[in-house]
Amino acid sequence: MLLLHGFGDTPQTLGYLARALNAAGYSVRAPLLPGHGRTAAEFACSRASEWMASARREYDSMLGSYRQVGLAGLSMGGALAAIIAASAPKLPALVLLAPYVGMPPLLAAAALLHRVWGPLAGEFKGSSDRSILDPEERARNLAYGVTTAGAIRQLLTVTRAARRALPAVTAPTLIMQSRNDNRVSRRVAERTYRIIPTSEKRLVFVERGGHILTVDYDRERVLTEVRDWFTAHMA
């Protein structure tokens, strides 16, 4: 299994899921994307093209070692997973967890104007307590907590690429999102479900956690749904 983390975050958000899948008998890889988990300055200099290329290399590398590779992504990792899935017709199963495939219009407009206001803003807070409602898990999170205008512009690039990719996704697809998600609206998840043309797809909403649903209050439900989806669709 290949698991992809989100924007400004680390594989730590996928730890529970990785261990659950490994316990079910799967080999799991959750790589650290370029610019992430190092310094905020390195993150600010990293590019969407690097994130997309790195995710693709990880997938291709696993294909060289395993007969089947399932794919799951959280937030921006879900967008990266969708991009890979669009050009992987033999992908056995795809899981999109709160996939960031729709940026709010005001934020998208700000991203496009990043050269205007970015130099004045510098680094600014990019996290929210609402992303992880469980205070203990929020304290464990290793995300930078800050971002830049340029980084948001790179996120918009990934988002747009993922939206273009969705109509070409043919793998059995599970989409999960919290109704309390502060980053991705429910409409984005519903639109993603409609656009993906595969006949075998499922949209599941959980009720108690925030955007990072893999570590929040609903995580046991999330782990079970994801594990069962892969079990049902992979040899």
Image (cartoon, grey):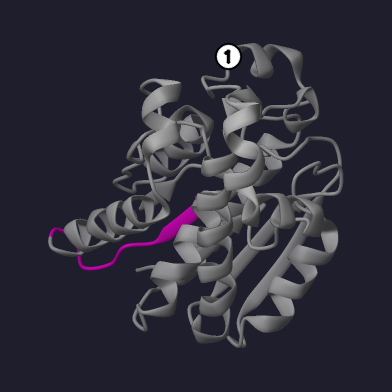
- The image shows residue 20 at horizontal and vertical percentages of 48, 38
Q: Position of residue 144 (x, y in %)?
A: 53, 22
Name the spot of residue 205 as percent of width and height, x first: 80, 55
| Residue at the image position 62 percent from the left and 88 percent from the top | 199
Judged from this view, the residue extending furthest toward the left is 64
In the rendered structure, the answer to whether residue 171 lies left or right of residue 1 reads: right
- Residues in magenta, as a range: 65-73
Q: Which residue is mark 1?
A: 140
Helix, strand or loop for the magenta stretch, by majority:
loop
Which is nearer the eye, 76 or 139? 76
Query: What residue is drawn where x is 59% and y is 43%?
Result: 223
Provide residue 225's location: percent of width, then percent of height.
63, 53
Residue in the foreground of this view, choosing between 10 and 122: 122
Which image quarter holds the C terminus?
bottom left
Mark 1, secondary structure of its residue: helix
Q: Is residue 102 visible?
A: yes
In the rendered structure, does residue 15 fall within the stretch colored magenta?
no
The amino acid marked with disc number 1 is: Arg
> Where 232 sits versus 123, above or below?
below
**In the image, 178: left or right of 66?**
right
* Residue 231 seen anywhere in this rendered image of the structure: no
Is 205 above or below relative to 127? Answer: below
